[in-house]
Every structure is written in C-alpha cells, then in structure tokens.
Image: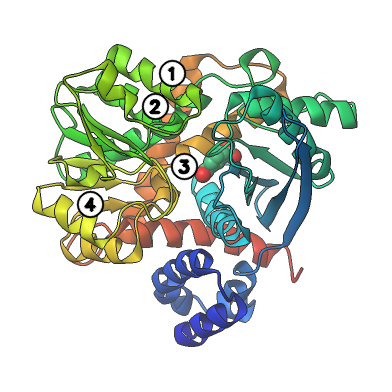
Amino acid sequence: MDLHKLIAELEEKNPAQPLYIQAAKEVLETIVDFVNANPKYDKYAIVERILEPERIVQFKVTWVDDNGKIHVNRGFRVQHNMAIGPYKGGCRFHKNVNQDTMKFLAFEQTFKNSLTTLPMGGGKGGSDFDPTGKSEGEVMRFCQAFMTELQKYIGPETDVPAGDIGVGAREVGFMFGQYKRIRNEHVGVLTGKGLNWGGSLIRPEATGFGAIYFLLGMLAAKGDSIKGKRVALSGFGNVAWGAALKCEELGAKVVTISGPDGYILDEDGITGDKIVYMTELLATRNNVVAPYATKYPNAKFFPGKRPWEAKVDVALPCAIQNELNFEDAKILVANGCKYISEASNMGCTTEAINYFHEKKIAYAPGKAANAGGVATSGLEMTQNSMKLSWTREEVDEKLKAIMNSIHENCVKYGTEKDGYINYVKGANVAGFIKVADAMIDQGVI
Ligand code: 8G0
C-alpha cells in the first residue's frame, strides 16, 4: 500500500471530517508495514475497502417538548463493516454529534470488536440531541421518535445498537419499548438492557472493569502492580464509575473525576459512598461535577481545569474524544505518570500519543483498553440467543479472559525491537487481520 497516496485520498474524500481522518490515519500509519509484508491485502484492495463505511443512514427526528414546542434533531447510524458479525456499537446523544463523529466511532468499533474475539462487526449511531436538563417525558418522546426511524435498519442478526454518552439504561429501555411496539418482537436487538428483560450482569460496569483489567496486563508487562497506585479519572459517568469500583477493590487510589465544568481532586480517595454519589450526580443530568466538593468538603474543585494536572501514576481518560492533548501529556509525564489506559474512544490527541511513545510511557488506545464494554454486550447477545442468563462470576471470568487475550495480541503485534510495547500498533494490526481475512474469504462485495 502507498501510505502517502492513501492519506491524500482519505483527506480529499472526507472534507471537514477531522475526527474520521485522525482515526483512519492512525490505523494506516500503524498497519502499513504489516500490509506491505503480506501482498494478499493489496491484491484484494482491503485497505481501500475497509476505509469506506458499508452504509450511512441519516434521518430526521422530530419531537415535542413539555411546553409544546417542536424540535428537529439529526439521527445517524453508520454501519461500518459486517465481515465478522452483525454491526455492533452504541448510540451517542450529545450536542456535538455529527456524521464525522459517527464515522470515526464506527471505524474504531470495527477494529475493537475484532479484538474482542467475539463475532461482531462495527457500527455506531446517535443524535445531536442534548439530554442536559431534559425531562423524563421529553427523553422518552425523543427516544421513541429516534427508534421509529432507526428500527428500519437494525435487528438482532443485522445491527445491534446500545447506549453510549447520553444514553443509559433508561434510554435503552425507551428505545427497546418502541422497537417492540413497532415490530411486535421481543428480541435481542439492543444491549445494555434491564436485567429482567434480557440484560446481562456486569454490563454497566464492564467498560470500566475492562479498562482496569487491561491496565493489570500493562502493569504486569513491566513487573509492576496496581496496589497503592494513584489514579486520575476523567468524567463521572458509567465508565469512570466502573473504573473507580475496580480500583477500590484492587487497592488503587482514585483521586480525580471531572465534568465539563472542571475537575475534583479528592486526596482522601474516591471510594465507597463517593462512588455511589457519582451515579446520583449523573442522574441529575445537569452535567456538572462541582456539587461533589459541596457534599465532600475535603475535596477541591478546580473550575475549568482538566484532571491531568494532578500528580498520579495512572491516567484513565473516561470522558470523550481528544480530551487529553499534548500539553496534558507533558504535565502527566513530568509528574511521573507511567500508564495511560484509554477508556474513552480516541481520548488522546495524536500529539499526546506521539509524546507518550517518545517517552516510552505505556499507553493503551481505547480500541484495546475499553473493549470490555462491547465485549460484554457481545456476551449479552450470546445469552439472548441461548435464552438464559449467566451469573456475575461467569460474565466477569469471560470479561477478564477477553481483556487478557486483547493484551496478549497487542504484545504479539506491537512489541518493538527494544521491548517497548506499542499498543496502538498492536491493536490496529491484530484488529485488522481478522476483519481483512474475513473480507478476502467473502469475495469482492
Ligand atoms: O455495547 C456496545 O455496543 C457499546 C456501547 C457503547 C460504547 C461502545 C464502545 O465500544 O465504544 C460499545
């Protein structure tokens, strides 16, 4: 493959889509040597084909607020690649969502889902609907209007959405209800469902748990341990919550969480009832973290700042794409941070990642470190197909085994001559191989 030509074409074909270009460029740059060493991929034009989403649907979502005012939002579903299983990926409701966001997330999802070892293709969806401050009735009407369109394109063997930023168990419930009403089928068309109507144990915790299980692999690879490590989390949603629970259980000390309004530094550690309080904060849907410092006066609130200025050993971005930039990376490293396990999707900018690599810091990209979320969704799909429910222990064992296998694959394809593990390269090459080989087997389609 001709890397420069492909990047030039990528930029030309995707004008004004910087996130998609960022995600795709990173993959191209890290798989180029592998692809050029294996001519079959060029023969079947696999790289060119994997760069093009199989289908993008965009639709109008019209809904009425509590005051009778009519609103119009955009809904999206990007069905990126179906080579190894039905499309799978969450739905994000966030004011910044556009086609670029959806394309980059669906592209990353294809590689991530491949890494999980489970049969899932890559997809992503969502809307520019902003749930901040919306009433329950407004959210329900929005979800119903969204699903009225989306249901045309999904199904348990076709495309299985789930939640993501702004979409939790409540929204999945509203969407499931509407799908069931329209199609008259109670099937596993969504994951992240409630426990008594097809959901899986551990799914809410899975992304955070998985990111910590992956971190255990990163630590072990350096002969290090998690005990006593100081950890900075960003965000205060589902992912940060799961990570905080697992850190407490394993003896690491979480000292930060954050929101769009700033970050909290709690030197006493974010444990026990404070982790429960994170879920209460989230449930207010005000999208601010400041009230934590009122409830726990020993903690400090830094308005407008990000948690990466705290002195920590481990950083876990758990919020949103490009939330950790070059300046943040420099401060983290200067303060002695040695491990970054990315729980958000594309949480670090390209410049931040390059800096971590230059300084030989262990950095795991989201598509490896946060794959536990979608992996557990895959386990939910299996339970739905078998019409049974596994215990907490059974799901947790499988999740641990999956995260271990992803770590091993990253080591296999990402270890450099000096022994440094380039997790970005490892994840991209390992994720690529499975999808690419399946595409070759299935012919030119
Ligand atoms: O379960 C899912 O399909 C899902 C939901 C939200 C995010 C992700 C992800 O892998 O980023 C997956």
Image location (x, y in percent) of residue 342: 35, 46
Q: CA distance from mark 4 to mark 1?
A: 33 Å
Identity of the amino acid at label 3? Ala
State whether residue 257 is above or below residue 31. Answer: above
Please report whichever mark, 3 or 4, sits nearer to the chain's N-terminal start. Answer: 4
10 Å crowding of disc 1: few (<14), some (14-19), many (20+):
few
Please report whichever mark, 3 or 1, sits nearer to the chain's N-terminal start. Answer: 1
What residue did someone put label 4 on?
Answer: 362
Q: Name the disc covering residue 280, or none.
A: 1
Please report whichever mark, 1 or 2, sits nearer to the chain's N-terminal start. Answer: 2
Q: Nearer the viewer, residue 308 or 194?
A: 308
Q: Nearer the viewer, residue 96 or 375?
A: 96
Q: Residue at x 35, y 61 (%)?
A: 349
Q: How is the image coloured?
A: rainbow
What residue did someone put label 2 on?
Answer: 242
Identity of the amino acid at label 4? Ala
Which of discs 3 and 2 lies nearer the camera? The answer is 2
In this image, 233 relative to 103: left or right?
Answer: left
If the image is split into quadrants, where does the C terminus sit? Answer: bottom right
Residue 235 seen in the current view:
yes
Does the closest atom of ligand 1 sit within 8 Å of the Cβ of label 3? Answer: yes
